[in-house]
Amino acid sequence: MKLKTVIKNVLLGSVAGLAMVGTAAAADLPVKAKAAEYVKICSTYGAGFYYIPGTDTCLKVGGYVTADTYYTDIDFKASVATPLGYASVSDDPDGQSYFLTRVGVQLDARTQTEYGTLRSYFEGRFNAGEDYGFGQQITTGDFSFSDGARNQAVLKYGYIQFAGFTFGMATSAFDFWAGDGWQGIQPGSYYSDATLNVIQYTADFGNGFSATIALEDSYGREDEFANFSELSGQQVPDIVANIAYEGTWGAFKLSGAWHQIGDWNPLVGPDEDVALFNSNDDSGWAVLAGVRFDFAETTTLYVEGAYSSGAPGYLGLAGTIPVVDAFGNAVSGWYVGGALIHYWTPSVFTTLVGSYTQSDNFSVGYDLLGEDDGIDGIASTDFTGYNVGVNIGWIPVKGLTLVLQYDYLSAEYQGSDYLYGPVTPLAYSAEATQNRVTFSAKRKF
């Protein structure tokens, strides 16, 4: 019995030992890793979207790099005739060459909800180089003359869209053509193209028809002087509305805007304390009509016209003509513009693009002797401008566009008519012209 018990104990101990060895060996074996969560394609919103891991949100990351080379030749001349004599001045500097580079970063995030698509969009622009000549400035979009460094980061777009609403930095509901056809970082002038802070609501009626009502930041339309002097700051944002259609043949838009004008005193009396005139108009407004025709998938034609009173920013003339004139009357003007874009082959295209603008006659104060001792008198003037261009582009590979462009610009003030003052100008004119050649290389990704 004792021998039998010993053998039994040895066998049981061996089994226990083998079990412990098996357990230890199992512990040393590698544990099966959790399956990796790979990025999945999101086909709901088109090409380039991917699901953000762990979410039901689709994200598209993109951007572009634009490198421009410019050559600009400017000519300026002015003349004035008074009972005291005639004077003229002209300036024809040598042509200038300069470079501009822009890097754009774009993020588009979309999520499907019970109320429709929730979308957030961002585009940041990083500009570097010199900015010379007349044209829309690369940071503000205003038409003016500039000669200085432009190394800045700019928020172009940053908005949220949800259930028909748009909140944030977005394209104005007023705009339609917005300069399509112009190439390069510095496009043409004399048309409406504004990106500003908005609250918009768009109703989709189906069959291509929609309508939008919006509150838009008036500061984004005018220059600093207009915003804080002529408009007395912003008490009420601009109210903008449109009705639009998008179909197989093209598109059209009819839009209108209301723009508040402050109680500004454009002139003061001899003691510089007593106001001679106050603003007679407290509201500005603008209307626009535009149409786009698409022909055979190779040709696109834009035609657009706009008229404004007391709202020059809606003509692309912020800082070029005043909101109100020397007597406080709203200054009116109009423009007509468009573009014809034709693809000769899938990789070669040409464009004819341009616009013409003109203001009504308006009153301005002048300091004839330049002594800053007050206003010598009031004269009337008007503004006329046009900018036309032609370009040819080549797309050698997908995502890369090379363009050569020429454009001509004219900006002219002409005035006469004695209105008020001891010294009467009989005639006045000032004109600037610009010939410009642009070579632009753009890579989109």
Image (tube, rainbow, N blue to C red):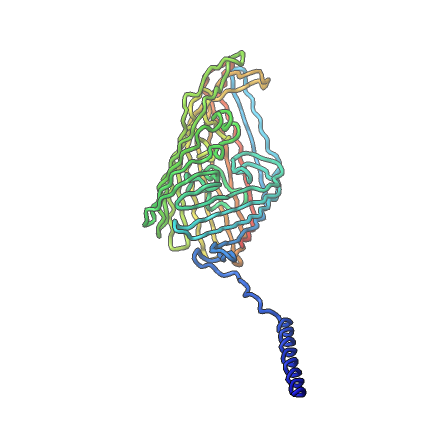
Looking at the image, which residue sits at the far top?
Answer: 271
Q: Can you see residue 51?
A: yes
Q: Position of residue 400 (x, y in %)?
A: 54, 55
Query: Compared with residue 254, is residue 372 higher up or lower down, i.e. above or below?
Result: above
Q: In the figure, residue 78 lies in which quadrant?
A: top right
Which residue is more in the foreground, 224 or 431? Answer: 224
Q: Can you see residue 347?
A: no
In the displayed structure, does residue 387 sit left or right of residue 96?
left
Query: Compared with residue 220, is residue 78 higher up or lower down, i.e. above or below?
Result: above
Q: Position of residue 214 (x, y in %)?
A: 40, 37
Residue drawn at x 53%, y 14% is 272
Q: How many marks?
A: 0
Q: Position of residue 438 (x, y in %)?
A: 56, 45
Q: Position of residue 22 (x, y in %)?
A: 63, 76
Which residue is more in the foreground, 270 or 424? Answer: 270
Q: Which quadrant of the rendered structure holds the C terminus?
A: bottom right
In the displayed structure, does residue 246 sit left or right of residue 59?
left
Q: Which quadrant of the rendered structure holds the N terminus?
A: bottom right
Looking at the image, which residue sits at the far front?
Answer: 1
Residue drawn at x 50%, y 30% is 320
